[in-house]
Image (tube, rainbow, N blue to C red):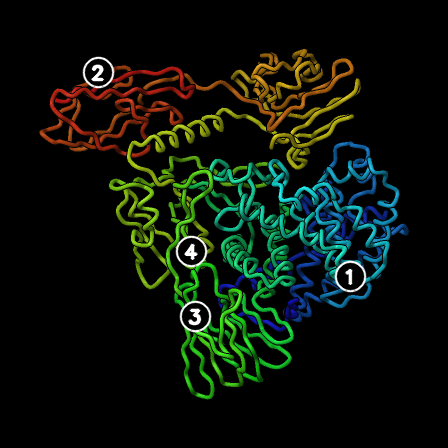
């Protein structure tokens, strides 16, 4: 069992990491405590001293930022002792004590939202927010020593017990079907301090036993589950094991957490350590197909790191330390803008997008809150200790103070290849991680009393040896030094569902290629969540002109050139040797590519990739509005209403349904004027016979009966919105049970779409070092190409619609790039240009002269 150092015992000496803390501290000091307290005061019936903050802090989730803020400032105070921060903590706790109801209830929203959850009425995750409030108050007590915070959270914990103790099994199932954050984690952590069995019982009410049992069996049942709902559940399972004293009877919960961690890392994680697409886990090991601009919610990463950290402390298993370093550097450090301190919600894995950050006081996303916490504890997992050794898990220049010693680490990684530990005071034994990226290649130099000894990974003495992935060095005294030199190399990381879609790492850092800053326009999704767009043509594959793709990837280290002493690389032997790859965590001002499809010219794989990307682009273009069903944030944005309605997951897809004669649900959805608008819904064939009606603004649109039209599978159905609604910005779409039946389920996304464009043809043809017999005109289809005696000319065929397809001699091409074409006198080059609908097309011929 390992212990962690208090935050004030580890000082980071690296300028990049220190900047992260400084930017976060400056941001935290700008907060107005009275604005954070406003909602809490309103619930108590008191007059707030200031207005509530906007964004999420003016919705049903208000108060979640208060919880994150309290945790963040408590960590900041524990690390720095900053008096201004302490004053903020004390002021807030005094305000929360004043706002607490006699029952113990404390929140920025009324208690009726908890009733709504139990009664299956739409509302936005009140237990999620309660988790943050309890965690923040607990941190204020444990890290900042505020005794009043203990009294407040103790009383609040008893309110949780009073409420949960009244649940029937049916009510418990209903509540646990709605995101509740880490309520079990927060209550077990509170129990660790209070030892009040009522807090423990309340925590156990949030333990989702069926989920734990399935994962404990090793079953990956995560497909379709909301990731940041699921990860904290297993943190709670682990915290039960910890808070109750590591009892044998609780080993099941510990093992469930272990197996969950393994499943997420092996089956659902990208090279950065992040996971999910649009907040949800997908099919096991299907990752390339899920790469978008909405991958890797940063809250997920925050929680996975908490899980890895606690599992490491219990087991000493190096795999958790390897995961922690990789994910902390490449996902967490990557998520903060080093100039402003603002943080990210989604971290795109699709090539061509860019990083989008929160605003200081407008949005208040969940990831704004975890971002506050992330950068006030950057030093909490560099070192651990037991009775004999100091364990070193990260290679960051820093100083650690122990009871017996002061040790200074000076690291050159990743720019260099070594890290040195100098004993400044006292005596120490070190256990230094040999990271997975070295493949065991390490050299250690030990200087004791001026004498130098050098050891390799296979050398062993009583004082220097390797065991379980750590280099152990014993008997160090003041002025002794230990230097470990590691072998850093370029390694390719393919995705399970596409072995030719690779990312690259150099040592511990993920590399990404900068793609310029043209047209970096942002868009919105969910409740005021800002995301990146890819509204320009962007090549996201790399062509290997010679040899096979497999051979190229197998020899990736030989196919990469380091450009300078900096961590900067380029490929060689490709059509994209001009790309420059640098550490992704430092990539902040331009579009980027982490993953690249490595392809051979004109291969089936390349043509398939081009087709799929065009299909995605055209669907995005015709989508007017969409709702990820069962995702409370997006449903609330569309003003969900209903009775006898619920959400769930089936076959990896989220769904919403309604039941009984009074069951219904509705949304407000956006229309586009001047075009035909369609409602697009997805149903499941085996639900055949279910009957319901669809209404637009309470007028019947369709009497629907589900039919098994796709032989036991899902199918899409499109309904035209009547033209009389043209000109309205929004309409209300309502699904209501007809007879004693069910609505749906309606699966995945409910969309408003328009028709695909049918404009086929080429917009233009650009010829280099050759000429056409006449000026190109899209309506003219026959040309003579004068190659001027050349064997190859470069031509760019540009479709009339950017989402259309262009085939040259029956090969689907990337029309965003010029193409080399072999030309022989008399040869006829045939170009088929499809419209956006992929049905209408026009054929052009170019006869070589």
Q: Tell me the number on the disc at residue 192.
A: 1
Element under label 3? loop
User: Does the image show residue 97?
Assistant: yes
Mark 2 highlights which residue? 782
Q: Which mark is residue 458?
A: 3
Instruction: Using the numbered discs, state the Cα–Cα distance from disc 4 to disc 2 in whole angstroms.
Output: 49 Å
Work out whether 837 lies above or below 106: above
For residue 35, say whether it is visible: no
Residue at 42% of width from left, 47% of height from top?
503
The earlier-in-sequence mark between 4 and 2 is 4
Q: How many marks?
A: 4
Real-space CA distance between mark 4 and mark 3, rounded to the nearest whole angstrom = 31 Å
Task: Say whether disc 2 or disc 3 marks the residue closer to the N-terminus.
Answer: 3
Of the residues tagged 4 and 2, which is closer to the observer? 4
Q: What is the quadrant of the C terminus in the image?
A: top left
Label of residue 583 in the image: 4
User: Do residues under tags 1 and 2 come within 8 Å of each other at their CB atoms?
Assistant: no
Label 3: how many Cα within 10 Å (few below 14, some 14–19, many 20+):
few
Q: Which quadrant of the view contains residue 150?
A: bottom right
Separation (CA) of disc 1 from disc 4: 40 Å
Answer whether labels 3 and 1 touch (C-beta < 8 Å): no
Residue 142 percent location from the top left of the image: 74, 65
Q: Is residue 261 left or right of residue 198?
A: left
- Quadrant holding the N terminus: bottom right
Q: Secondary structure at mark 4?
A: strand
Q: Is residue 38 above or below residue 694?
A: below
For the point 79% across and 49% down, which residue is it? 204
Can you tell which quarter of the image residue 667 is in? top right
């Amino acid at each position: 069992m390992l212990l962690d150092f208090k935050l004030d015992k580890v000082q980071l000496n690296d300028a990049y990491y220190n900047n992260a803390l400084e930017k976060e501290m400056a941001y935290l000091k700008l907060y107005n405590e009275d604005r954070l307290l406003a909602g809490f005061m309103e619930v108590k019936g008191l007059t707030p001293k200031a207005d509530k903050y906007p964004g999420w802090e003016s919705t049903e989730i208000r108060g979640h930022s208060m919880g994150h803020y309290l945790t963040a400032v408590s960590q900041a105070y524990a690390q720095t002792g900053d008096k201004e921060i302490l004053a903020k903590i004390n002021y807030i706790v005094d305000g929360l004590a004043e706002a607490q109801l006699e029952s113990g209830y404390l929140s920025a929203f009324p208690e009726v939202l908890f009733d709504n959850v139990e009664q299956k009425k739409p509302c936005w995750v009140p237990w999620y927010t309660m988790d943050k409030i309890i965690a923040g108050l607990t941190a204020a007590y444990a890290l900042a020593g505020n005794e009043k915070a203990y009294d407040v959270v103790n009383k609040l914990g008893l309110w949780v017990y009073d409420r949960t103790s009244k649940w029937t099994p049916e009510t418990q199932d209903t509540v646990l079907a709605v995101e509740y954050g880490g309520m079990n984690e927060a209550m077990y952590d509170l129990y660790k301090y209070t030892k009040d069995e009522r807090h423990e019982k309340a925590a156990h009410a949030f333990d989702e036993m069926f989920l734990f049992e399935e994962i404990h069996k090793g079953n990956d049942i995560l497909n379709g589950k909301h990731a940041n709902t699921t990860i904290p559940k297993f943190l709670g399972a682990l915290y039960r094991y910890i808070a109750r004293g590591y009892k044998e009877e609780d080993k099941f919960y510990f093992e469930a957490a272990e197996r969950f961690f393994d499943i997420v890392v092996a089956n659902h994680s990208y090279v950065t350590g992040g996971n999910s697409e649009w907040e949800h886990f997908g099919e096991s090991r299907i990752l390339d197909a899920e790469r978008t601009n909405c991958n890797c919610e940063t809250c997920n990463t925050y929680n996975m790191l908490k899980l890895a950290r606690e599992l490491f402390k219990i087991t000493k298993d190096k795999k958790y330390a390897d995961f922690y370093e990789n994910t902390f550097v490449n996902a967490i450090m990557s998520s903060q803008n080093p100039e402003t301190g603002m943080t990210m919600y989604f971290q795109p894995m699709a090539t061509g997008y860019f990083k989008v950050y929160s605003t200081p006081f407008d949005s208040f996303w969940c990831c704004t809150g975890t971002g506050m916490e992330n950068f006030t504890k950057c030093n909490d997992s560099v070192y651990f200790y037991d009775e004999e050794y100091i364990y070193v898990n990260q290679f960051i220049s820093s100083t650690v103070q122990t009871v017996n010693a002061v040790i200074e680490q000076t690291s050159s990684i990743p720019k260099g290849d070594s890290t040195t530990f100098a004993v400044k005071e006292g005596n120490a034994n070190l256990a230094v991680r040999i990271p997975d990226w070295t493949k065991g290649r390490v050299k250690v130099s030990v200087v004791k009393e001026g004498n130098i000894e050098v050891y390799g990974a296979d050398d062993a003495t009583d004082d220097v040896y390797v065991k379980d992935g750590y280099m152990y060095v014993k008997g160090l005294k003041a002025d002794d030094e230990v230097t470990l030199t590691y072998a850093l190399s370029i390694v390719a990381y393919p995705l399970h569902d596409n072995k030719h879609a690779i990312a690259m790492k150099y040592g511990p850092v993920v590399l990404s290629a900068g793609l310029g800053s043209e047209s970096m326009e942002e868009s919105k999704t969910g409740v005021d969540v800002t995301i990146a767009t890819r509204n320009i043509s962007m090549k996201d594959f790399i062509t290997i002109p010679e040899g096979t793709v497999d051979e190229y990837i197998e020899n990736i280290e030989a196919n990469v050139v380091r450009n300078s002493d900096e961590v900067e690389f380029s490929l060689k032997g490709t059509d994209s040797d001009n790309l420059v790859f640098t550490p992704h965590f430092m990539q902040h001002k331009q579009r980027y590519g982490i993953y690249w499809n490595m392809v051979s010219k004109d291969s089936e794989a390349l043509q398939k990739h081009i087709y799929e990307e065009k299909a995605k682009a055209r669907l995005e273009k015709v989508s007017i509005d969409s709702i990820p069903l069962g995702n409370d944030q997006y449903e609330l944005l569309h003003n969900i209403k209903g009775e006898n309605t619920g959400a769930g997951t089936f076959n990896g897809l989220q769904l919403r349904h309604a039941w009984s004669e009074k069951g219904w649900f509705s949304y407000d959805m956006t229309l586009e004027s001047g075009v035909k608008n369609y409602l697009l819904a997805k149903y499941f064939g085996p639900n055949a016979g279910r009957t319901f009606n669809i209404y637009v603004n309470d007028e019947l649109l369709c009497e629907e009966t589900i039919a098994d039209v796709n032989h036991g599978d899902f199918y899409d159905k499109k309904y035209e919105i009547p033209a009389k609604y043209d000109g309205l910005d929004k309409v209300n779409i309502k699904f209501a049970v007809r007879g004693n039946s069910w609505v749906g389920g309606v699966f995945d996304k409910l969309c408003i779409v328009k028709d695909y464009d049918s404009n086929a043809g080429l917009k233009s043809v650009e010829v280099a070092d050759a000429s056409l017999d006449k000026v190109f005109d899209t309506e003219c289809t026959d040309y003579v190409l004068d190659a001027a005696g050349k064997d190859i000319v470069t031509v760019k065929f540009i479709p009339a619609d950017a989402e259309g397809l262009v085939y040259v001699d029956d090969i689907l091409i990337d029309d965003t790039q010029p193409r080399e074409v072999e030309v022989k006198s008399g040869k006829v080059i045939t170009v088929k240009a499809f419209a956006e609908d992929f049905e209408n097309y026009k054929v052009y011929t170019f006869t070589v002269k």
